[in-house]
Every structure is written in structure tokens, then in C-alpha cells.
Image (cartoon, rainbow, N blue to C red):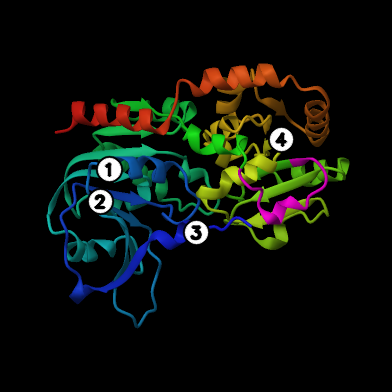
Amino acid sequence: MIKDTKKTNYKITDKRLNTTSPATYEMVVFCHLRWQFVYQRPQHIISRIAKHTKVLMIEEPLGRGIEEEDSANLIIINNNLHVLQPKVLSIEAIASLLPQYLKNSSVAIGWFYSASFSPLLYAVNFDTIIYDCMDELSLFKGAPEKLILQEKMLIAHADIVFTGGKSLYESKKQMHHNVHCFPSSVDKSHFAKALNGIEIPADVAHLKGPVVGYFGVIDERINLKLLNDTALLLPHIEFVMIGPLAKIEECDLPREKNIHYLGMRSYNILPAYLKVFDIAMMPFALNDSTKYISPTKTLEYMASEKPIISTKITDVVRDYSNCVRLIDTADDFAKNISFILEKNDRAFMRKEYKNILRNTSWDTTVDKMQFIINTFAK
């Protein structure tokens, strides 16, 4: 059985305000996603930047008891990358923690993934401020109304704005003079491991029917009714959902016998699960929260040479309609699954994937970002 060991590679310390030794950092990142959550855009980009830059990444507050003092967990990913998990009651309260962790009051780069951190724009003297907008977070379920105003504030202070897709780029370029589009990319060699002899994980090895699989966060962006209805139409097909739940409950999930929820699996072993997929799916709902998304998993599925079926997400339609099968309804979904299993042209698919993957990688993305930063840095 394949073991998931990714989470054991971190040194975690709980530092109180009066015992912390400040360190010197060249970049401070503010991120709404936790480093040890699903491995996606922030982890890919920041881990590469940290190869040559000392980085402190600050997550959203964990919260604390009313009677407790403000404190934080400091996670040492490696010598150049530290992650701070504040135990405070609000994002604004993080400002009082920073002197305990930042030796330098001036930092070369402030990198923001969420406008919710905009109250901290003045907490540190940043030479250059970057907003890497990977999602339209104001449209997500439960987003606070003030997030729109906070984003306007962040964009007004930003020197550079990056976007995680073309739809986001078209939206943000109306708001700032220096916007650059960097769609989701891929670590091709990692996901190509699904093509070799790696072992299939035990929790999917027993599945007898063809497997249609998904990995990623399972939240309001997933069309659960579409998944349920398609599973009913194809009882001989196994539908595998890999990933944590967010902003929905267990009771919201359809429970057909041929739908399997495996929970979160680490980035390290995703290729082993992809190996068992006959088809990879992106059953996204078409709603406000998916209006601007550019799914990272599209290219990851391609790197493992899996046929892909997706609902009509704008950036997927625009960039990949020649090789991703696009569907609207459960009937469409079922027909396309049957077609792929019976007579899909895999040679054409592989050729198109190869052409797409030739032009993108996370290494290339970060190199281009670094060039822009060096060009526009103050």
C-alpha cells in the first residue's frame, strides 16, 4: 500500500510572543490557503521563489480562545521558507505579531493572494507589492461583502498584478495598469508518473468498473447533482472523488453506491490515483464561484494522458475545446463517458496534450514572473 508521508516533512513550533526570535525575510506572502491544504498555485509558485529568496508565508488566522494570548505556529518548510499560522481573533491583529517574527521593518516584496489581508498593507514597509489573483474570491460562498472594497484598496497599492487565468486577466486589467496573465501551469514530470509502473493505492485497487475520477477541493463549485444523475445513468462506472470538503457538509454529498469519496490525498501520491482513472472529470457547476476559474487540474490530467470531460468553464472552453470533451447535462456526461471508453481517439488526444504541455510549466511561469518583478521593482 502506498503511504502518504508528505505531511511528516515539516518542523512545527508554537512560538509565544515573548519567546520568538525575529528573522530577516526578503518576501512576505499573505495567503488565504493553508500550506498543508491542497497543493496548488501558491505552493507551486512560492516554493520555487523560495529556492533563491527567504520567504515568510502568513496564513489566515487559526483563531484563539477569548482568554488566550495572541500567538502563532511557525512551520519550517525549509531554510528559505517559513509558514506562520497566527492564533489571533482577526487579520488586523496579525500586525501586532509581525515584529516578533520580522527582524526587518522593511521588506523587498509583499505578495498577496487575498485582498482580505489588505489591512496589513501598512504593517510592513514593502518596496514592491504584488497581487497574485488566482480566484475571484468575492464570488465564493460565504465571502464577506467588504472583500470587494478590500480588493480595490489592494489593487490601488499594488505595483504588479498577476492573474491565474484569462477571464481574471480581462477583469483585472480594467482596474490596474500593470496586469499580467499567468494561467495555471503544471509539473509535467510529476503527473507523468501515472504512466509508469507505480503501485495503485489499495483504496482504489478493488474497483472493478471503469473509473471516472476527480481530485481537488470539493465545495460549492462542484455540480453534485450532475455527478449524482450521471452515476445513476451509469451504475457500472465507478466515480472517484479525491479531496477535502470546504463550505459544504457531508450530508450535501450524493451517496450512490458507485460514487466514492476518498478524502484528501497529498500531492506526492496523486499520480498513483491518476493511474487508475480511465477518464478524468471536472464536473464544475456554472455559477458565480466558477465564472473566472482556470482549473490547475486540467493540465495535470493532461500530463497523465487521461481523457478529460468537463462542464463548460469559460477558460476551459476557450483554451482546450479541441481536446477536452465539454458537456452540459448528465445525459451528455454519460454519452461522452461511453464514447471515450468505446472508441476515443487516444493518439489525437496525446498529440494535442503534447502541444499544450510543451508551452507551459511552473518553472517557466516563475521565471517569467521573476523577470517582470525585476523589471518593475522599485
Q: Position of residue 222 (x, y in %)?
A: 65, 45
Q: Do the numbered discs 2 and 1 sit on residues whose CB atoms are within 8 Å? A: yes
In the picture provided, is 271 more to the left or to the right than 42?
A: right
Residue 318 vs 85, above or below: the answer is: above
Q: In the rendered structure, which disc, 3 or 1, sits on the residue that comes first in sequence?
A: 3
The residue wearing badge 4 is: 279
| Foreground of the two, 179 or 198 | 198
Magenta residues (range): 198-211
| Foreground of the two, 245 or 136 | 245
In the picture provided, is 159 more to the left or to the right than 254?
A: left
Q: Within 10 Å of the Cα at label 3, are there few (<14), some (14-19), or many (20+) other Cα atoms?
A: few
> So how many labels did they put on this image?
4
Which label sits on residue 5? Answer: 3
Amino acid type indicated by mark 3: Thr
In the picture provided, is 247 more to the left or to the right than 20?
A: right
The residue wearing badge 1 is: 51
